[in-house]
Image: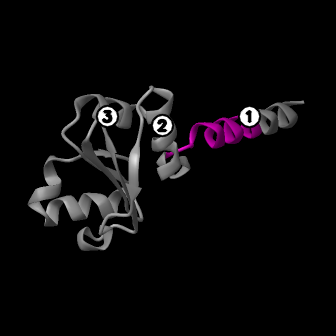
Amino acid sequence: MKKSLIIALLLLFAFSLAACSSSSSDITLDSFKEAFTTAGLEMTDEDVPLFQLIDAKAGIMFYINNEKVAIYEYDSSKALSNAKKDTALLSSMVANGKFLLETNNEQVKEIFSGVK
């Protein structure tokens, strides 16, 4: 009986850890686009920025209310952190997991930071 209870508790613990371990790796560039449209913001002129110049692996660029918005994806949050250390321009940009936001729009920054 005690063995069964211990095994059941261990399995419950393992499953609860797996359920809580969802991370920013579940977030995609499309997650951010969906969050902006859900918030009622219209994205126009979607394009691909020169993300390689800042050592990112992907990126999207568009305009919201005639303001440029660019989101860059890095291989990991550690790679993003290293890029921010190496490039002074990036240090003031908002990060969310392995994603970096380039904009001056405060509403966009709030929505970006809220994506989980």
The local secondary structure at tag 1 comes to helix
At label 3, counting other C-alpha atoms closer than 10 Å, the crowd grade (few under 14, some 14-19, many 20 or more) is many
| Inter-mark Cα distance, 3 to 2 | 15 Å
Task: From the image, state whether disc 3 or disc 2 is nearer to you.
Answer: 3
| Inter-mark Cα distance, 1 to 2 | 25 Å
Task: From the image, state whether disc 1 or disc 3 is nearer to you.
Answer: 3
The local secondary structure at tag 2 comes to loop
Of the image marks 1 and 3, the number of the one nearer the N terminus: 1
Q: Quadrant of residue 32?
A: top left
Q: Quadrant of the N terminus?
A: top right
Residue type highlighted by circle 1? Leu
The residue singled out by tag 3 in the image is 108
At label 2, counting other C-alpha atoms closer than 10 Å, the crowd grade (few under 14, some 14-19, many 20 or more) is some
State the extent of the magenta-drawn residues as a range: 10-23
Residue type highlighted by circle 3? Val
- Looking at the image, residue 62 sits to the left or right of residue 14; the answer is left
Of the image marks 1 and 2, the number of the one nearer the N terminus: 1
User: In the image, residue 70 lies at what x, y percent?
Assistant: 31, 52
Task: From the image, state whether disc 1 or disc 2 is nearer to you.
Answer: 2
User: In the image, residue 40 lies at what x, y percent?
Assistant: 45, 26
| Inter-mark Cα distance, 1 to 3 | 39 Å
At label 1, counting other C-alpha atoms closer than 10 Å, the crowd grade (few under 14, some 14-19, many 20 or more) is few
The circle on residue 116 is 2
- Looking at the image, residue 3 sits to the left or right of residue 30; the answer is right
Name the residue located 56 percent from the left edge and 43 percent from the top edge. Answer: 21
User: In the image, residue 52 lies at what x, y percent?
Assistant: 31, 73
Residue type highlighted by circle 2? Lys
Q: In the image, is residue 8 part of the stretch drawn in magenta?
A: no
The residue singled out by tag 1 in the image is 12
Q: Quadrant of residue 41?
A: top left
Q: Nearer the viewer, residue 50 or 63?
A: 63
